[in-house]
Amino acid sequence: MISLDKGTIVLQYLLLAGAFFIPVANTCSQFFLYLSALLFTCLLLTYKPVDIFESRMFRLATCFALIAILSLFTGIYFERTLDKLHRLCLLLTIPAIAFAFKDDAGKFSWKCVVALLLGTVTLAIYDTIRYPIQITQWELWEGLASIKHADFTAYVQSLGNMRDPQFYMVGLLIAVILFCYTDTKVVKFLLIAAMLLIGIAFIYQFKRGSWFAFGFSFIILISFIRRPKLIFPIIAVAVLFLAIPQVRERLTQVVDEFDVNHGGRLVLWTKVAPKVIQDHPLGVGYKATRWEDFHASYRLIAPDLDHLHNNILQITAELGWLGIIVWLVWMVYTVHLLWLNFKRSRAKGCDFRSVSTLCLLVAFIALLFEGMVEYNFGDGEIFMLFCMIFGLAELLRATGQEEASLET
């Protein structure tokens, strides 16, 4: 049997590898994070090093998981729910992170943030190479003049997905924060290069929700770090951004989402969601909604659409009123926890802890903004990112309390 010390070291490497691979490869990140959950469970059962239920964060996560499991019986789609319950095992990464990194929370939380950024840069490098190649392979491509083709924007959009732009959104915010708090010229240069790569890949995705969420989160970031001068470079970037015709085209298409004849988000939020929730007050089951459920409420629904493009409405539809209440308390508690950690660490000066806490806080706020127009809490990769943030927030809380008690 592996010793507790060696097991803890292995657990640290597994979690850091998981943080790196979350943006890069779903299979790899799942391998490392599921393995870390398994290893932590073995260490917990063998050595009992911590009481995981002392953590309010994990108690809230456990309540959410129990409601999801209960939805097997209160919902209407047993098999669909059962097929998705395995991902709840990833919630064990919350106490695993808090346990594995407790000896130097600030340093290890910073390493996790950097690992996530490096993974995002790796993904951005791949996309900045992949997109031009695939664009030139378009069946209607006839040179640069094809950029003006009416279907060009739709084709480029089809090359992306709903997951990657959220990683670019978070990675770009992290890079900006690290740039603001570093004095080393080489590091600043590398961060500028990272921001350029991520920014290009971010534009390629043509996902408006992530663009808007980034903008709102950036404004909040400026208020947190009290650097109003950052407004000027962001205005310059916004002007260049809006100078791209395809960007303007995507932004003007927002009105389609509020056209009842288009079957967009307004229809989902005002006609479909209320009907599904009213018919199933206990929820249809965790991750179990189907296109047929939506089409029965409103006929003009896009084919294969099986979620409501909103975290609150979707979780209510899946887990009922009890589920959404627990989820909302969980999210508010996490924001509150990260904010308190940031204030406490900032009062002590700029260090690994304060910078990483700010990165986590702004990233979490950005994901919540995105969740207003997407069901990102239900996306496998983004759910892993949420779990990493929950775990690091709990780590910083627990170690912060210990430091405060030692000081008094």
Image (cartoon, helix red, strand yellow):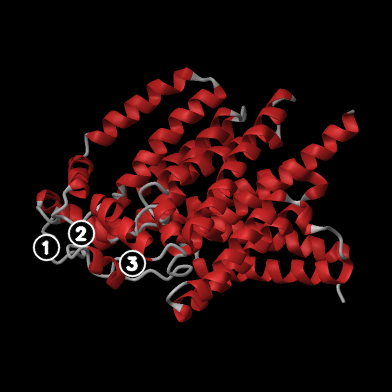
Q: Is residue 28 left or right of residue 10?
A: left
Using the numbered discs, state the Cα–Cα distance from disc 1 to disc 2 in whole angstroms.
10 Å
Dividing the picture into quadrants, the one containing residue 358 is top right
- 10 Å crowding of disc 1: few (<14), some (14-19), many (20+): some
Numbered badge on residue 140: 1
The mark nearer the N terminus, 3 or 2, is 2
Pointers 1 and 2 in contact (CB under 8 A)? yes
Percent position of residue 382, x then y: 49, 57
Numbered badge on residue 306: 3
Residue name at image x 45 percent, y 68 percent:
287
Using the numbered discs, state the Cα–Cα distance from disc 1 to disc 3 in whole angstroms.
31 Å
Quadrant, the N terminus: bottom right
Q: Nearer the observer, disc 3 or disc 2?
A: 3
Q: Is residue 90 left or right of residue 263?
A: right
Percent position of residue 344, x then y: 71, 29
Percent position of residue 402, x then y: 84, 39
In the rendered structure, which amino acid carries the disc numbered 2?
Tyr
Q: Count all numbered tags in the image, as a single digit.
A: 3
Residue name at image x 58 percent, y 57 percent:
20
Q: Is residue 279 left or right of residue 367?
A: left
Percent position of residue 185, x then y: 58, 30
The one nearer the camera, 14 or 210, is: 210
Numbered badge on residue 155: 2
